[in-house]
Image: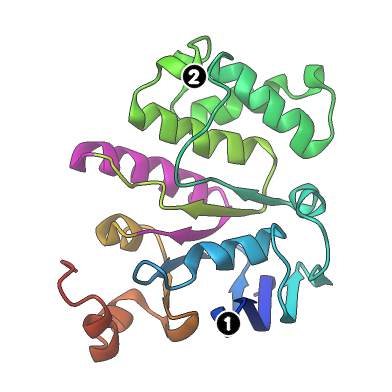
């Protein structure tokens, strides 16, 4: 199976604080990888290194066989890296459809008129078609999360990064969002998902990676990882 992403001994420090410590792993095309770890473990920094929002101090990032370690974030978007953020920040004065059209036009470098069909399909996939003409500022939290997912999909990603997208949802809302993400993954989208809602994460991913103080301390089958004594100690006091 071809790897869509490879990190090789990637490290990043901010002053004296090392937030990413010689991280190495690969993600095969079509797989869903979950990333867990306590607050401050370096999860969001890892995403920023993958997307090109920050550059590593050492190590290499390879995307679809190409060394992108020093490549800017926008170039990585055009290569097929899409990302959602923890706190959705849509253009609240624009409709749901208009938000997607903007993301598709800029993310893919296409004229707005040429992205209509793709946006409509994404609205269907993300269960937002009935909200297409609703101003983004009027959406419920679940639909704001769906819109954040849809905007990431509108850039045309082969690799989709989800950053705590289930946070703040009720049990029922979380279940609905998981079903949507499962549907996208079933279409062949490669996913890397950071999440604290573990039952949502393990319902989708085939592998789990555990970070602690910027280091990878576990990578493998979710059941095996969650049975690890070291992982359980990290999550002591958190229901797993």
Which label's residue is closer to the chain start, 2 or 1?
1
Q: Say left or right for 127 vs 155.
A: left
Q: Of helix, strand and loop, which one carries label 1?
A: loop
Q: Tell me which secondary structure the magenta stretch mostly adopts.
A: helix
Question: How far apart, in angstroms, are the residues tagged by discs 2 and 1?
Answer: 41 Å
Between residue 36 and residue 188, name the one nearer to us.
36
Other residues around mark 2 within 10 Å, as few (<14) / some (14–19) / many (≥20): many
* Residue under the point 71% across and 74% down: 56
- Name, please, the residue furthest toward the top: 133
Between residue 177 and residue 186, name the one nearer to us.
177
Where residue 215 sits in the image (x, y, percent)?
Answer: 49, 84
Q: Which residue is mark 2?
A: 136
* Residue under the point 63% across and 26% down: 100
Where residue 174 sits in the image (x, y, percent)?
Answer: 28, 43
For the C terminus, the quadrant is: bottom left
115 above or below 163?
Answer: above
Q: Which residues are magenta?
A: 170-195
Other residues around mark 1 within 10 Å, as few (<14) / some (14–19) / many (≥20): few
- Name, please, the residue furthest toward the front: 15
Residue 109 within the segment the image draws in magenta? no
- Residue 221 placement: quadrant: bottom left
Q: Say left or right for 22 vs 58.
A: left
- Residue 213 placement: quadrant: bottom left
Q: Which residue is mark 1?
A: 16
């Amino acid at each position: 199976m071809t790897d869509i992403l490879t990190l090789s001994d990637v490290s990043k420090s901010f002053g004296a604080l090392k937030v990413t410590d010689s991280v190495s792993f690969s993600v095969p095309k079509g797989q869903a990888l979950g990333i867990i770890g306590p607050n401050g473990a370096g999860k969001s920094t890892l995403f920023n290194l993958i997307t090109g929002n920050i550059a590593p101090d050492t190590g290499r990032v390879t995307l679809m066989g190409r060394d992108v370690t020093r490549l800017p974030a926008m170039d990585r978007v055009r290569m097929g890296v899409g990302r959602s953020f923890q706190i959705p920040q849509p253009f609240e004065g624009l409709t749901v459809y208009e938000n997607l059209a903007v993301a598709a036009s800029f993310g893919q470098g296409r004229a707005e008129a040429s992205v209509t069909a793709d946006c409509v399909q994404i609205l269907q996939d993300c269960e937002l078609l009935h909200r297409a003409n609703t101003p983004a500022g009027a959406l419920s939290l679940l639909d704001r999360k769906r819109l954040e997912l849809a905007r990431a999909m509108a850039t045309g990603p082969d690799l989709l990064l989800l950053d705590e997208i289930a946070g703040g949802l009720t049990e029922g809302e979380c279940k609905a969002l998981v079903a949507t993400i499962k549907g996208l993954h079933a279409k062949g989208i490669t996913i890397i998902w950071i999440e604290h809602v573990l039952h949502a994460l393990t319902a989708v991913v085939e592998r789990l990676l555990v970070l602690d103080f910027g280091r990878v301390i576990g990578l493998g089958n979710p059941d095996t990882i969650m049975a690890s004594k070291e992982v359980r100690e990290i999550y002591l006091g958190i229901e797993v």
